[in-house]
Image (cartoon, rainbow, N blue to C red):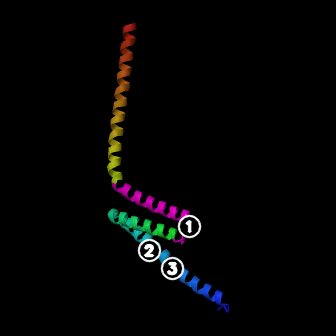
């Protein structure tokens, strides 16, 4: 324990700031955990709400100086990727079905076009002879 008055005050101030920082850090970590549990559960609506809350908590921690700006951006980006991947899984089967149908249609029309061209060229050659 320090003997000098200003040093005693610094210790007291540091303890106060450390408690505040730990509280903020704990709050944003809890928010991130809630979001991740919602994503794992597959609940898109709850995950969306938790994402908004976690983003808010991360921004608050950044504003208070608990985490650095780039760290906050990286964490938010990571959460957004998880949310987008989760929501994409739900609609992926619908999109895949549509894509497969359009691919089949494209190949059919391509085959038709090729056969039509070859038929026309064959007729043109016959007429030239």
- Could you tell me how far apart the alpha carbons at marks 2 and 3 are, in whole angstroms? 15 Å
The residue lying toward the viewer, choosing from 53 and 77, is 53
The magenta stretch spans residue 68: yes
Please tell me the numbered disc located at residue 30.
2
Mark 2 or 3, nearer chain start: 3
The residue lying toward the viewer, choosing from 50 and 65, is 65
Mark toward the viewer: 2 or 1: 1
- Could you tell me how far apart the alpha carbons at marks 2 and 1 are, in whole angstroms? 18 Å
Q: Is residue 9 left or right of residue 25?
A: right
The magenta segment: 64-90
Across and down, in percent, residue 32 comes to: 44, 69
User: Which element is circle 1 on?
Assistant: loop
Residue at label 1?
Answer: 68
* Picture layout, residue 50 above or below residue 106: below
Q: Residue at x 32, y 63 (%)?
A: 45
Mark 2 or 1, nearer chain start: 2
The answer to whether mark 2 and mark 3 are in CB contact below 8 A is: no
Residue at label 3?
Answer: 20
User: Which element is circle 2 on?
Assistant: helix
Where, quadrant-wise, is the N terminus in this rendering? bottom right
């Amino acid at each position: 324990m320090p003997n000098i008055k200003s040093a005693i005050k610094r210790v007291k101030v540091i303890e106060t700031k450390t408690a505040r920082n730990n509280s903020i850090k704990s709050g944003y970590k809890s928010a991130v955990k809630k979001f991740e549990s919602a994503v794992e559960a597959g609940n898109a609506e709850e995950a969306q709400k938790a994402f908004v809350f976690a983003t808010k908590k991360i921004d608050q921690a950044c504003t208070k100086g608990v985490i650095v700006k780039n760290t906050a951006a990286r964490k938010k980006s990571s959460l957004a990727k998880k949310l987008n991947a989760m929501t994409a899984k739900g609609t992926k089967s619908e999109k895949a079905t549509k894509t497969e149908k359009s691919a089949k249609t494209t190949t059919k029309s391509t085959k038709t076009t090729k056969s039509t061209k070859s038929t026309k060229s064959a007729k043109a050659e016959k007429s030239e002879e």
